[in-house]
């Protein structure tokens, strides 16, 4: 717990009298605002929350957007070490990912609860109340979790109070998180510049280089970095320093591999998918037990312009290396001007400072203060906007003259607050400004100085007009979580919106045969159990379930609000669906039931989304040609004996690295233009697909020879893939194609495109 946070809830009432919720929220705002550091703010919020709810202990989790993890910065009780979990797992992960609070009466009966923490600490969790930490804009930045309410069960009132406290503190916490991040980035940049300034015109090996490589690894947020130095006697590149490699040393000819290509050409290389580049040698990964995803490599040049080695950085956390990463590594390797780097650093810090100031000015609630004489003293930008007024009209004007007519009730509330000295809250009240009706939540509270002298009153108005309108319209057909996202986005998309969306289709194989064996009740039971698992996989990745079509599922990623990585979310959801289905089938087989097999198709395209239907029956859905292609890809799994097929339009937008291969260039049923199709294999294990990476390399070589009509060479490569995995049906299919085309040459006009005759 932070130093200086020993106060209990201020101004506590006599025993037996409950502290008003508004007072608690006001105290939260004051306590959090008083704390100068983020840790002190978090400690204050946890202390006040556990005391207000009557919980045994609590934990506050913040989201790390770079690692997609929730981490604890404040924990009460004997268990003090940091906790990190994926931001979609556990109770806190569920609350963070859905943005909705949660009550758990029996922790051990909830499958989302992680028992390992109790096992490590010896603590026994009985019940849990968990609320998201949301900013006024609806952005979820973390979750606050309280355990084991004393003297009774947790209630909906407890959750609502916790949510309100978290929301009250969210803006200040977000500001402090940003300031802390800014300071850490400034410190990292300063450390990086300090190291670079110590480098002379000639490369000096030893402790200085170790410090340099450690700094580069940290600065670029990578897993490993290696300095390859050229040995002029043997014309080999060897590792002198390898951050993350320990004592391992690697030597190879200075023209081979990625590092050799950079050394001989003098040009930097940025490879987002290492195994897709023919220059990459997987043998290094075998030797070290490391799996390389992405590579950034740049030459090291001395003062005479001579290339003396290369710097290589592997596996940036959170995605491929960016253009900014490449620029930083070039600056390090070439030892550019320190003054230029300082100017760049100053510019970045200045931009962060400006952003922070703009964030502080972006409060969405109106704040109006009135002095003892009843005159309006201040009104923020949000207040001017909500009241449809200007500073010249409202400031220094008697409040009774400004709040008139339908707004006069504010003056009555203000007088009551002045007399009683207590906060007053009115929910969902109606006001009128400029001839327009506005729905507000109004809070009036007394202003008192440190000597308990009255200074006036403050009126806070939260404009909920848009929220009420959207909720009223969308409650007819949309999931509440999606409705909340739409309201947070501020977009009016109900009438139709054209946007780029990733569509996922899945379908059960031989479903008619299954239904004949199960009967009506058995079929319904199977579908309910199956759909529950599949929909959970989709919703964990932020997908929207569009509809069930018999035994098929149609889902979309990127509506109603795009997330920037919707293609990756769809692919991760597809992989999770296959993995969940594998566990589902194991349980079915153990009960003597037949397993369920599915195919999944994923495509990204511009579609139209919106409210479609009649006044009596409406549905928020998507339509467009891209939806049809996703459906065709799902069906194409039958012909290719695959499980997940992804179109080139999705594949090109993926930011993550996946074990995949190009399967074919195909014209699906109902289309005239070919599309390149990829198979995603991340759900496989060593048992289900042995020698996967070696087999994919063989398959890639075979496909290249196949496109050149070198049937014997292609068939040999595909057979090589089959030797590595005899169950690889795609390679088996291509062997048959090669034999057919060898006997029936397609001619010079053939472009390698395969035309499907059926869906």
Image (tube, helix red, strand yellow):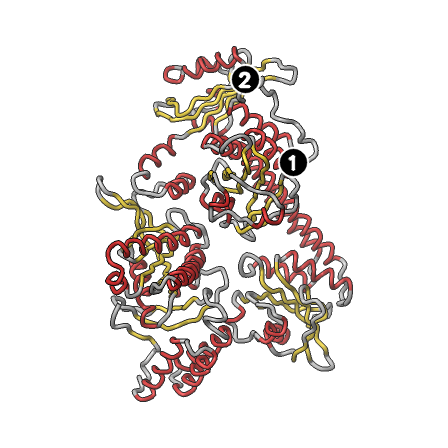
| Rendered-image quadrant of the C terminus | bottom left
State if disc 2 and disc 1 touch (CB < 8 Å).
no
| Rendered-image quadrant of the N terminus | top right
Measure the C-alpha gap from mark 1 to mark 2: 27 Å
Q: Position of residue 503 (x, y in %)?
A: 35, 57
Mark in the foreground, 1 or 2: 1
Q: Quadrant of residue 574?
A: bottom left
Q: Residue at x 30, y 58 (%)?
A: 552
Q: Which residue is mark 2?
A: 446
Q: Is residue 123 above or below residue 552?
A: above
Q: Is residue 13 left or right of residue 524?
A: right
Q: Is residue 441 left or right of residue 84?
A: left
- Badge 2 local density, few (<14 within 10 Å), some, or many (20+)? many
Q: Is residue 633 above or below residue 125?
A: below
Q: Which residue is mark 1?
A: 40
* One can see residue 132 in this view: yes
Q: Closest to the observer: 256 or 627?
A: 627
Q: Closest to the observer: 254 or 9?
A: 9
Q: Closest to the observer: 575 or 392?
A: 575
Q: Quadrant of residue 220?
A: bottom right
Q: Closest to the observer: 580 or 488?
A: 580
Circle 2: element type: strand
- Badge 1 local density, few (<14 within 10 Å), some, or many (20+)? many
Q: Residue at x 63, y 59 (%)?
A: 328
Query: What count of labels does the image hold?
Result: 2
The numbered mark, 1 or 2, whose residue comes first in the sequence reads 1
Q: Position of residue 744 (x, y in %)?
A: 29, 87
Q: Is residue 542 above or below residue 196?
A: above
Q: Position of residue 9 (x, y in %)?
A: 60, 25
Q: Is residue 343 left or right of residue 750?
A: right
Circle 1: element type: helix
């Amino acid at each position: 717990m932070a130093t200086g946070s020993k106060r209990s809830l201020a101004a506590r009432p006599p025993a037996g009298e409950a502290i008003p919720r508004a007072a608690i929220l006001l105290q939260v705002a004051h306590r959090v605002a008083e704390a100068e550091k983020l840790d002190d703010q978090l400690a204050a919020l946890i202390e006040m929350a556990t005391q207000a709810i009557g919980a045994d202990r609590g934990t506050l989790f913040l989201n790390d957007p770079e690692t997609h993890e929730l981490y604890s910065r404040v924990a009460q009780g004997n268990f003090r070490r940091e906790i990190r979990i994926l931001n979609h797992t556990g109770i806190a992960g569920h609350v963070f990912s859905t943005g909705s609070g949660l009550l758990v009466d029996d922790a051990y009966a909830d499958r989302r609860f992680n028992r390992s923490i109790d096992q490590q600490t010896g603590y026994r969790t009985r019940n849990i109340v968990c609320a998201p930490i949301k900013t006024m804009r609806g952005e979820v930045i973390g979750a606050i979790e309280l355990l084991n309410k004393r003297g009774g069960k947790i209630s909906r009132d407890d959750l609502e109070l916790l949510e309100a406290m978290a929301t009250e503190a969210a803006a200040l916490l977000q500001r402090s998180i940003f300031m802390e991040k800014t300071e850490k980035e400034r410190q990292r940049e300063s450390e990086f510049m300090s190291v670079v300034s110590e480098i002379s015109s000639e490369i000096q090996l030893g402790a200085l280089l170790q410090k340099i490589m450690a700094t580069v690894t940290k600065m670029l947020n990578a897993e490993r970095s290696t300095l390859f130095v050229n040995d002029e006697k043997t014309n080999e590149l060897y590792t002198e320093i390898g951050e993350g490699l320990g004592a391992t040393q690697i030597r190879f000819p200075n023209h081979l591999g990625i590092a050799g290509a950079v050394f001989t050409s003098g040009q930097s290389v940025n490879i987002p998918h290492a195994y897709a580049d023919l220059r990459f040698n997987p043998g290094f990964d075998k030797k070290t037990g490391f799996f390389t995803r992405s590579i950034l490599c740049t030459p090291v040049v001395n003062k005479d312009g001579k290339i003396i080695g290369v710097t290589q950085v592997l596996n940036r956390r959170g995605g491929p290396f960016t253009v900014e990463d490449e620029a930083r590594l070039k600056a390090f390797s070439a030892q550019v001007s320190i003054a230029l780097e300082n100017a760049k650093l100053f510019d970045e810090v200045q931009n962060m400072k400006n952003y922070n100031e703009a964030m502080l000015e972006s409060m969405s609630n109106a704040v109006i203060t009135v002095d003892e004489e009843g005159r309006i003293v201040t009104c923020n930008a949000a207040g001017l906007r909500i009241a449809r007024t200007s500073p010249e009209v409202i400031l220094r004007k008697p409040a009774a003259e400004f709040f008139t007519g339908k707004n006069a009730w504010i003056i009555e509330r203000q007088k009551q607050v002045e007399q009683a000295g207590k906060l007053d809250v009115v929910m969902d009240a109606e006001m009128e400004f400029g001839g327009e009706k506005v729905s507000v939540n109004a809070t009036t509270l007394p202003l008192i100085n440190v000597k308990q002298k009255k200074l006036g009153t403050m009126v806070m108005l939260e404009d909920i007009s848009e929220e009420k309108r959207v909720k009223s319209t969308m409650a007819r057909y949309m999931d509440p979580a999606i409705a909340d996202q739409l309201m947070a986005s501020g977009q009016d998309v109900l009438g139709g919106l054209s946007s780029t969306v990733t569509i996922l289709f899945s379908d059960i194989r031989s479903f008619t045969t299954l239904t004949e064996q199960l009967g009506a009740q058995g079929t319904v039971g199977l579908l309910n159990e199956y759909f529950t698992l599949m929909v959970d996989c989709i919703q964990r990745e932020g997908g929207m379930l569009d509809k069930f079509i018999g035994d098929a599922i149609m889902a979309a990623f990127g509506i109603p609000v795009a997330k920037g990585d919707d293609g990756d979310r769809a692919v991760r959801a597809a992989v999770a669906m296959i993995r969940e289905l594998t566990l589902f089938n194991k349980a079915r087989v153990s009960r003597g039931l037949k397993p369920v097999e599915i195919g999944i198709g994923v495509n990204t395209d511009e579609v139209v989304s919106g409210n479609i239907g009649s006044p009596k029956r409406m549905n928020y859905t998507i339509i467009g040609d891209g939806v049809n292609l996703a459906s065709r890809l799902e069906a194409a799994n039958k012909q290719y004996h695959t499980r997940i097929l992804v179109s080139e339009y999705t594949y090109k937008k993926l930011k993550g690295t996946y074990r995949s291969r190009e399967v074919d260039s195909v014209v699906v049923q109902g289309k005239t233009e070919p599309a390149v199709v990829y198979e995603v294999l991340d759900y496989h294990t060593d048992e289900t697909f042995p020698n996967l990476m070696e087999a994919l390399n063989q398959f890639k070589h075979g496909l290249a020879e196949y496109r050149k009509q070198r049937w014997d060479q292609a068939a040999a490569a595909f057979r090589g893939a089959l030797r590595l995995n005899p169950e690889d049906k795609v390679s088996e299919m291509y062997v048959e194609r090669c034999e057919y085309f060898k006997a029936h040459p397609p001619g010079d006009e053939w472009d390698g495109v395969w035309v499907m005759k059926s869906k």
